[in-house]
Structure formats: C-alpha cells, structure tokens
C-alpha cells in the first residue's frame, strides 16, 4: 500500500545517506511507533559497519517490548562491525528470550563469530534442551561453528545424538565431528537419517558421512 511504499522509499534514502544518517536514526529509535523504530533499525542494518555510533542504542533495543524489533536489532548489531566482546554477551542473553524467533536470531548471530564465540559454549549447550527443535538444532550448529574450542559442550552434544528430532541428531553429529575430528558413534546417526523423508536432511546426513572419511566409506 501507499504507506508501505513510502516506508520502503524512506529506508532506501536513509541507507544511501551513509554515515550522515546514523545520528538521526539513533534518535528515531526512541519514537513511540514500533513501525517507525523498525524502519530505523532496518536502515541501520543496511548501513552495516558504518553504524558503530548506534551500537549502544541498538543494544538497548534488545530490551524492546516488540519481539520483531529485538530480532531486527540483533541483525543490525551483527552487521555493525562492533567488537565480539561488545556484542557476544548481548547475543548470549538474547538466546534466553521467550520468543523463539529472537532466540534463533541470537544463536545465529553468535555462530557467526565462530571460534571467537567460545564464551557462548555453555549457554549454547544448555539450549540443546530447549523445547523447540529448531532452537536445539541451531544451538548444535553454532557449537560446531565454534569448533575445537567448544569441547565443554561435548557431553550435551553426545546426549543430543539421542534427540527426538533427526535434524537435531544430525546437526549434533556434525558439531561433534567439527569439535573433535573423531567419528565415534556418528556413523549410525547419519545412516539412520538417510531413511528420513526429508530430502534436505538426507543430503545433510550424506555430507556428514562423507566428511567422516574411511570409517563411513562402507556405508556410502
């Protein structure tokens, strides 16, 4: 509609303005309208690493009462170029959000730091018990992205190999491989997933088997 078109045009104009738009956008983050605040956050996300001055205000937005704004702030912060030490603690706190989509965005943002996200290992390992399977799967993926530095999560990942969700089991198996480089107990997990109806999951399991090398060759 007309209002939506105007909002999109305004966002594009602000994004094209570059760093000059950052300070005005910080002020807009205080607007009473959630839609206007969302527009400002989205424009800051588009500006990417030019938005370091907006980081404190975006961190505050992670406490906004509107879930969509909290998620948008995570995206904007992840593109801001701010230091891991500044962002990771905030993302870890957001993994405990009551809204699933916010938890997922926070997990994915943490995963992007890879080995530098080692301080998120324990909180992510706890999320392997989350009630939502996609949160559990995303947490396992994030731990795999951290790699060998996430060894503290190995017991929780081993337990996740018995998860009720095949997606979680396969992702946990891949994470364990990335962390340890060992195939112990992983071949049966990937083989079982090959019987699932989900084609993408079967492909993911096949890739998991192939990365294991010789121990998996008889089964491929």
Image (spheres, rainbow, N blue to C red):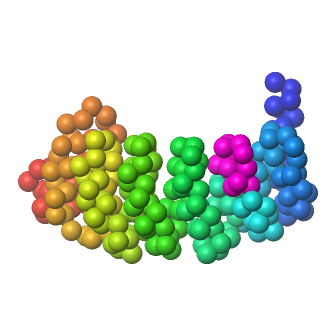
Tell me the residue at 68%/50% (across/down). 70
Residue 153 in the image: state x and y as whole percent: 35, 66
Tell me the residue at 15%/51% (across/down). 188
Locate residue 209 relative to residue 135 in the image: left or right. Answer: left
Q: Quadrant of residue 48?
A: bottom right
Residue 218 in the image: state x and y as whole percent: 8, 54
Locate residue 57 relative to residue 134 in the image: left or right. Answer: right
> In the image, is residue 196 above or below residue 27?
above
Residue 104 in the image: state x and y as whole percent: 52, 49
Is residue 169 magenta-colored?
no
Query: Which residue is farthest top?
Result: 1
Q: In the image shown, does 103 or 26 lie closer to the viewer?
A: 103
Q: Which residues are magenta?
A: 61-72
The quadrant of the rendering that contains the N terminus is top right
Tell me the residue at 86%/29% (across/down). 3
Q: In the image shown, does 198 or 28 lie closer to the viewer?
A: 28
Locate residue 144 relative to residue 75 in the image: left or right. Answer: left
Residue 64 can be seen, yes or no: yes
Tag count: 0
Q: In the image shown, does 175 or 152 lie closer to the viewer?
A: 152
Query: Which residue is farthest left?
Result: 218
Locate residue 83 relative to residue 176 in the image: left or right. Answer: right
Q: Quadrant of residue 6?
A: top right
Tell me the residue at 54%/54% (across/down). 96
> In the image, is residue 110 above or below residue 15?
below
Residue 203 can be seen, yes or no: no
Residue 82 in the image: state x and y as whole percent: 68, 70
């Amino acid at each position: 509609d007309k209002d939506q078109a105007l909002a999109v045009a305004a966002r594009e104009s602000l994004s094209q303005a570059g760093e000059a738009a950052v300070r005005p956008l910080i002020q807009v983050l205080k607007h009473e309208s959630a839609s206007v605040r969302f527009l400002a956050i989205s424009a800051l996300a588009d500006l990417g690493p030019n938005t370091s001055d907006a980081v404190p205000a975006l961190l505050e937005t992670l406490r906004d009462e509107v879930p969509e704004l909290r998620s948008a702030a995570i995206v904007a912060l992840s593109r801001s170029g701010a230091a891991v030490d500044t962002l990771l603690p905030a993302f870890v706190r957001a993994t405990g959000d009551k809204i699933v989509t916010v938890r997922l965005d926070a997990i994915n943002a943490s995963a992007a730091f890879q080995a530098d996200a080692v301080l998120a290992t324990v909180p992510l390992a706890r999320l392997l018990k989350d009630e939502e399977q996609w949160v559990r799967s995303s947490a396992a993926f994030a731990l795999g992205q951290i790699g060998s530095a996430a060894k503290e999560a190995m017991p929780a990942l081993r337990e996740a190999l018995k998860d009720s969700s095949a997606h979680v089991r396969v992702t946990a198996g891949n994470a364990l491989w990335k962390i340890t480089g060992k195939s112990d107990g992983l071949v049966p997990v990937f083989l079982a997933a090959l019987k699932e109806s989900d084609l993408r999951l079967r492909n993911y399991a096949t890739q998991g088997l192939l990365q294991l090398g010789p121990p998996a060759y008889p089964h491929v």
